[in-house]
Amino acid sequence: MVLQRLVRAVIMGPPGSGKGTVSLRISKSFGLKHISSGDILRANINAKTELGLLMKSCIDQGQLVPDDVMSRLILSDLRTVDRCSWLLDGFPRTVYQAEALDDTCTVDTVINLNVPFQTIKQRLTSRWTHLPSGRIYNTDFNPPKVPGFDDETGEPLVQRDDDKQDTVTRRLKSYETQTEPVLEYYRSKGVLETFSGTETNKIWPHVEVFLHRKLAAISQRMA
């Protein structure tokens, strides 16, 4: 699809909801640049920028990164890609951040992946990782040939702290508390579109159909 004007989209959903997979498919199918707040954060920390050092200090002390710092970081990066259409992933996470984004640009659509928490818990707590390579296995649908060991090296697999039951439950609760108000904020603006399901491959066709229709409408309005 050839877009007649720049499109600003946001994708939301709890950790483990399939945002990464859906984002890549949107980028490939519609030409939107996938912008991950996590990638921006890591890049700034690695480059030891002023904001990166400030964020690292917060993270090292186990503190949440302040809204204004996170907003300054992401919005500064967005200004460097103001000539292309993009899909923003991982930001905004609070209403303050959503308002800061609105002050910078107009968000055309917000795609919300609504996956049951029980499905996500099962999905994440079944993940095991080969740390040296980053290969990820899932005991439900992508198990290693030998339980507990990497297929290629035979080295032991580990379960990351992020994938342990208590951590997953805490992360999901945090998402629900922080992000539900953001969903309501975008719902009240009429730009929120929610897709519910338990499997990414079944959710994706609905996202694809919606985006074809949405982007065609945007192009017609600007023609």
Image (spheres, helix red, strand yellow):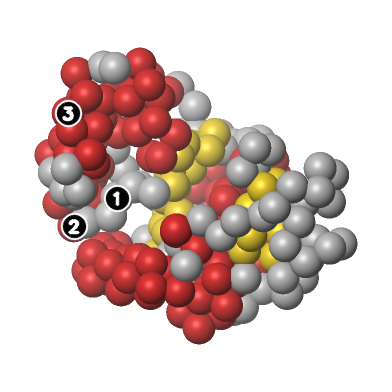
User: In what element is the residue under mark 1?
Assistant: loop
Residue found 35% across the figure and 33% down from its top: 41
- Image coordinates of residue 116 in percent, x first then y, are 50, 81
Residue type of the residue flagged with mark 1:
Pro
Whether 46 is drawn above or below 166: the answer is above
Which labelled disc corresponds to residue 92?
Answer: 1
Residue situated in front as seen by the camera: 157 or 82: 157
Circle 1/circle 2 CB separation < 8 Å: yes
Q: Is residue 30 visible?
A: no
Q: Give the SS element for disc 2.
A: helix
Mark 2 is on which residue type? Val
Q: Position of residue 171 (x, y in %)?
A: 35, 66
**Which quadrant holds residue 137?**
bottom right
Apparent side of residue 212 relative to residue 110 in the rendered image (left or right): right
Q: Nearer the viewer, residue 203 or 150?
A: 150
Q: Neighbour class for label 3 at 10 Å: few (<14), some, many (≥20)? A: some
* Image position of 5 (left or right of 200): left
Q: Which residue is mark 2?
A: 95
